[in-house]
Amino acid sequence: MSATQPDTITIFDTTLRDGEQSPGCSMNSAEKLEIAKSLVELGVDVIEAGFPIASPDDFEAVRTIAREFGNRTVICGLARCRKEDIDRAWEALKEAEKCRIHVFLATSPIHREFKLKMAEDQILKSTVEMVKYTRDLMCSRSDITTPNLEFSPEDAARTELDFLCQVVEKAIDAGATTVNIPDTVGYATPLHFKHCIEYLKANVSNINKAVISTHCHNDLGLAVANSLAGVEAGARQVECTINGLGERAGNAALEEIVMAIRTRGDFYGVKTNINTPKLFPISRLVSRITGMTVQRNKAIVGQNAFAHEAGIHQHGMLQNRATYEIMKPDDVGYVGSNLVLGKHSGRHAFRDRVKSLGFELETAVFEKVFQEFITLCDKKKDVYDSDIIALIESHIGEKSDVTDRWKLISVQTFAGANAIPTATVELQCEGDPQPKRDAATGDGPLDAIFLAMKRITGVAGTLRNFQVRSVTGGEDAQGESFVEILVNDKAYHGKGISTDIIQASAEAYLKALNRAMSDKQPTKRVLAQHD
């Protein structure tokens, strides 16, 4: 590869497809559209928007994203090697100027024997037939002569190399322009995966007619290392997700892949089209929407990623930041605990600060956030960037298709040593002028609040996860509460923020209940194993 003109790695984001398969991470159409918009602004080359045949909701989400953003970046839909899957994917994608269909079929011995019950020759035949079918279907659109078509031999990392070469060669002959090599169960090691890519490059006669892609899972914590090993070996597309979301232990984290390539450009000799200052904001967005909190010590986007506590480190940083930082916080759009405005700050100064933090707010939302900021200034001695972001994020997405049927009017609790925890809750139901009030006792004040809310709303949710964290440091810090509940075996989550963690927890639980009530007819999804 040339040092002066490095190859560009195609970044294929599958947050909306594979990332959504993380337990409890299902998203509605409005939320998917919001993430898709941010992915376009991030500079992602391909967005795998979903699995259209999985459910009517998935189909509509893919079609909406294709219509909205298909003229700016490639929108992709997943399909099994079945005509009905491929037809459904094409129906969702066909209006997009830039579109891709991604078909897959398992190839490893264990999948052939126990899942598919197909012999090698049957796998080869199905691959050729379905890739050709996809190619011909896409060519039915007059402006498409060479379809953007991806094929994945599922569980490629555990497939015999000679058979893998046969499948890949026939898929390319049939019309695949990208061949993805998935480590479906996170079994590979970097040397193993690198050898796999090198073997394909050396033994597939037509490999130069297609882009080699990687799709690595993180079961052994090696997804990013394996993906980068694939890049070393010649792969020129990497499939990844924001925050490493995905089935089981997740996928290769987009932000880690991109910053490794950028920071160690001297070693990899490649580049990406990613607008890296957008990494931290989109990480927070995906965390907020999915309810999956980013661990504090997470590389690139964790709260501690640019924190230095050891005295020797702090001394070195004061002399030269490069002593302990290989990246600048600004490179990834990191927002720390910078002291910002006060209660006497005007709307103009506050709006400028909001814009500098990367947010564009509609007038109505801006006014709500500004008023909450003024109120917060009365409660807190110091207000930080992180406080402002938390306020903004509590209002982003208010126009989504989740209706807040119930709103919290008031909550009061009584608890203490040798006392029976009691809570009194008052809620307002949409369309009902008379608020509803109830009281309950519980194992603690929060348990009592949740029980009272169950009685008022009539929704019996089982608490599955509950977390509270401080947004910034200090005794007067805002508390951010995360709640996940199960209703009819389906997970719903909510977040709340306040300097009072009791109120924040009540808001979070009520948001989860509202999500459950707005999802009156949950649709069964096709749960197929894939790459």
Image: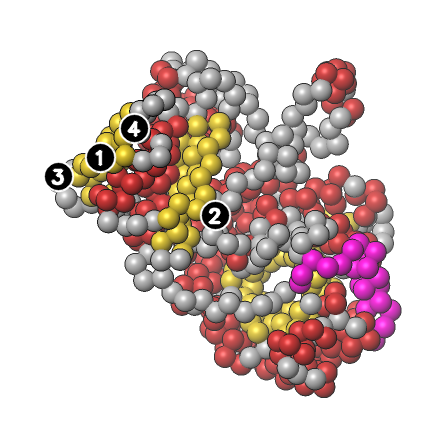
**Amino acid carrying mark 1 in the image:** Ala
Label 1 vs 2, first from the N-terminus: 2
Q: Residues within 10 Å of mark 3 (few under 14, many from 20)?
A: few
Question: Which residue is depicted at the point 82% across and 59% down?
Answer: 192
Query: Could you tell whether 432 is left or right of 518 in the image?
Result: left
Quadrant containing the N terminus is: bottom right
Q: CA separation, marks 1 and 2?
A: 31 Å
Q: Position of residue 348 (x, y in %)?
A: 40, 23
| Callouts 4 and 3 close, C-beta under 8 Å | no
Q: Is residue 398 above or below residue 305?
A: below
Q: Is residue 347 above or below residue 181?
A: above
Q: Position of residue 108 (x, y in %)?
A: 71, 73
- Residue that carries the numbered disc 2 in the rendered image: 290
| Callouts 2 and 4 close, C-beta under 8 Å | no
Label 4 vs 3, first from the N-terminus: 4
**Amino acid carrying mark 2 in the image:** Thr
Q: Under tag 3, what secondary structure?
A: loop
- Residue that carries the numbered disc 1 in the rendered image: 439
Label 2 vs 3, first from the N-terminus: 2
Q: CA separation, marks 1 and 4?
A: 13 Å
What's the magenta bit mostly, secondary-structure-wise? helix
Label 2 vs 4, first from the N-terminus: 2
**Amino acid carrying mark 3 in the image:** Gln
Q: Under tag 2, what secondary structure?
A: helix
Q: Under tag 1, what secondary structure?
A: strand
Q: Position of residue 382 (x, y in %)?
A: 46, 15
- Residue that carries the numbered disc 3 in the rendered image: 434
| Callouts 2 and 3 close, C-beta under 8 Å | no
